[in-house]
Image (cartoon, grey):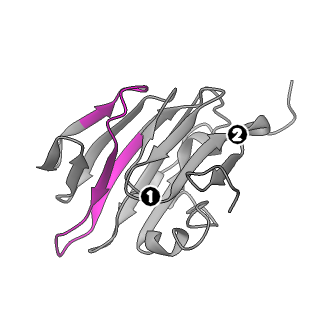
Amino acid sequence: MSNIEYPIAVVALEAPPRARPSIYPEPFASRMTGREKRVLGDLFGLSNFGVNLTNLVPGACSSLRHAHTKQDEFVYILSGHPVLITDAGETLLAPGMCAGFKAGTGNAHQLVNRSDADVLYLEVGDRSASDSANYPDDDLQAILGKGGKWQFLHKDGTAY
């Protein structure tokens, strides 16, 4: 049993933003400028899945376009109109819309804010061990290692 005390409830927009804007190595981390995540799942000590409240300013994106091998992902749009980019093309999303990304399909995805207003959405993903992610548009792959830390590699397997 842990001695850590977690809150019972919080106002999500008052939760502290993640200190480090991106875990990507450069030159990719700087492409995440304008994205702010509030890591709600960690705030409550959740270990089986993560929940983030994410804000994208105009011109920002959710992530590099990627697909997971083991982790399912889900997004729910609270406000704004992001463009969802998948292997099937582009889909304009609106408040109340949601999208899910089944692990292992190879269907890479990302949200991009091409509007002139902020986009706010919830993202939920499981924390499956031995996950990896492919980034088809970039020289990048990621492997979830021991302790839940991502290791980023070039597509040829060399480390960043």
Question: Residue 121 lies in magenta, yes or no?
Answer: yes
Q: How far from the left and from the top, in percent, is residue 66?
A: 41, 46
Total marks drawn? 2
- Residue indicated by mark 1: 13
Alpha carbon distance from label 2 to label 1: 17 Å
- Magenta range is 99-123
Residue that appears at 52% across and 26% down: 70
Q: Residue at 19% across / 69% down in the picture? A: 114
The location of residue 156, given as percent across then percent down, is 60, 51
Judge by depth and name the residue closer to the eye, 148 or 20. 148
- Please determine whether, in this image, residue 96 is positioned above or below residue 31: above
Q: Position of residue 44 (x, y in %)?
A: 63, 38
Near mark 2 (Cα within 10 A), the count class, few <14, some 14-19 or many ≥20, is: few
**Within the image, what quadrant is residue 127 found in?**
top right
Q: In the rendered image, which quarter is residue 7 located in? A: top right
The residue identified by callout 2 is 6
